[in-house]
Image (cartoon, rainbow, N blue to C red):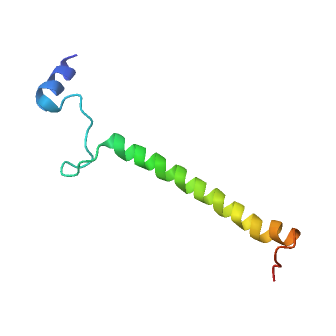
Amino acid sequence: MGESKRRKQSLGDRYGQDQRIVEWLPLTKKQAEDFYKWTTKGAWIGIGVMAGLWVTVRFIGPTFGWWTVQ
């Protein structure tokens, strides 16, 4: 309990607020984590779309006679 009081006293008005990554950059750690989650999810979606496109071009299209692979 003493550590909590010291931390509250040293931080003052900033106590309980999200911590910034860098003081001069208005970006909190929570925002950075959310951005990381979104970009990771987007990358996996992109990989899936690319794999689906490859399967379509390589196997599905030639099977239905839409084009030939040479």
Of residues 40 and 6, the one drawn nearer to the viewer in this rendering: 40
In which image quadrant can residue 34 be found?
top left
The quadrant in which residue 61 appears is: bottom right
As drawn, the residue found furthest toward the top would be: 1
In this rendering, the answer to whether 18 lies above or below 9 is below
- At 22% from the left edge and 51% from the top edge, which residue is drawn? 25
- Up the image or down, 31 lies above or below 57; here it is above
Residue 42 position within the rendered picture, expressed as x and y whole percent measured from the top left? 53, 53
Where's residue 10, x and y in %?
12, 30
Q: Is residue 66 left or right of residue 8?
A: right
| Pick the front one: 51 or 56 | 56
Which quadrant, please, contains the N terminus? top left
Can you say whether 11 is above or below 53 in the image?
Answer: above
Tally of numbered tags: 0
* Residue located 35% across and 40% down the image: 30
Residue at coordinates 81% horizontally, 83% vertically from top-left? 70
Farthest residue to the bottom: give it.
Answer: 70
Q: Is residue 32 left or right of residue 37?
A: left
Q: Is residue 62 above or below residue 40?
A: below
Q: Which residue is located at x 82 percent, y 73 percent?
A: 66
Give how far across and how far down residue 33 sits, in percent: 40, 44
Q: Position of residue 46 (x, y in %)?
A: 59, 59
